[in-house]
Amino acid sequence: MAAFLLPRRVADTAELRGQVRDQTDRLLGLVIGLVLLSVIIAFVGVVNALGLSVVERSDELGLLQALGMTGRQARSMVRWESVIITLLGTAVGVALGTMFGWLGVRVLRDEGLTAFALPTAQIGIAVVVMLAAGVVASMMPARRASHVDVLHAVNVE
């Protein structure tokens, strides 16, 4: 009961700003963690899509190699497919993220969030990292595409 009799301390402006900054930093850390999780899921998705593509097109890849396509060209083809998939996914992600960020600022305008700033440097870094991840994701399927059994692929059933 003695705790209720203690005088309460009123926070000044600097302490209030610090508390809001701490809460915002925690929320930002959560969002960054979710973004990293989505990048990992996208990476696995690209590897899976390319792997299935190579398996499903093994006959075509074998025929192309029988006609003179080198293993290096097959790997390059799969890598470019990965880059295209990654670019499309990144473009859609950046567009949707920008739209939802702008809408979030519009919704929270009455709460004091008035400025919308597009972090172009961070977006550029994210695009470059995603492209690198797309190339890395293509390594295993590209290797498999370059080692297709030509005789099995051209065998007519």
Image: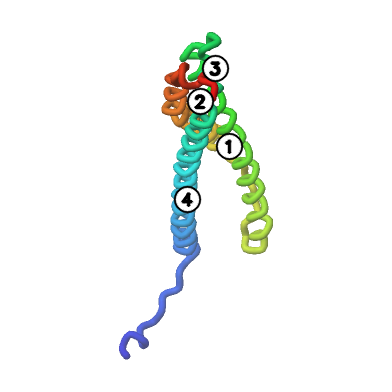
Q: Residue at x 52, y 12 (%)?
A: 66
Q: Which residue is mark 4?
A: 34
In the image, what residue type sits under mark 2? Ser
Q: Would you place residue 111 above or below residue 9 in this image?
A: above
The spot of residue 33 in percent (x, y) is: 44, 49
Residue 58's disc number: 2
Disc 2 from disc 1: Cα separation: 28 Å
Q: Which mark is residue 63?
A: 3
Q: Is tag 2's residue or tag 1's residue first in the polypeptide sequence?
A: 2
Q: CA distance from mark 1 to mark 4?
A: 16 Å
Q: Is residue 31 above or below residue 85?
A: below
Q: Residues within 10 Å of mark 1 (few under 14, many from 20)?
A: many
Q: Secondary structure at mark 4?
A: helix
Compute the Cα span from label 3 to label 4: 43 Å
Q: CA distance from mark 3 to mark 2?
A: 8 Å
Q: CA distance from mark 2 to mark 4?
A: 36 Å
Q: Position of residue 12 (x, y in %)?
A: 47, 66
Which residue was labeled with disc 1?
90
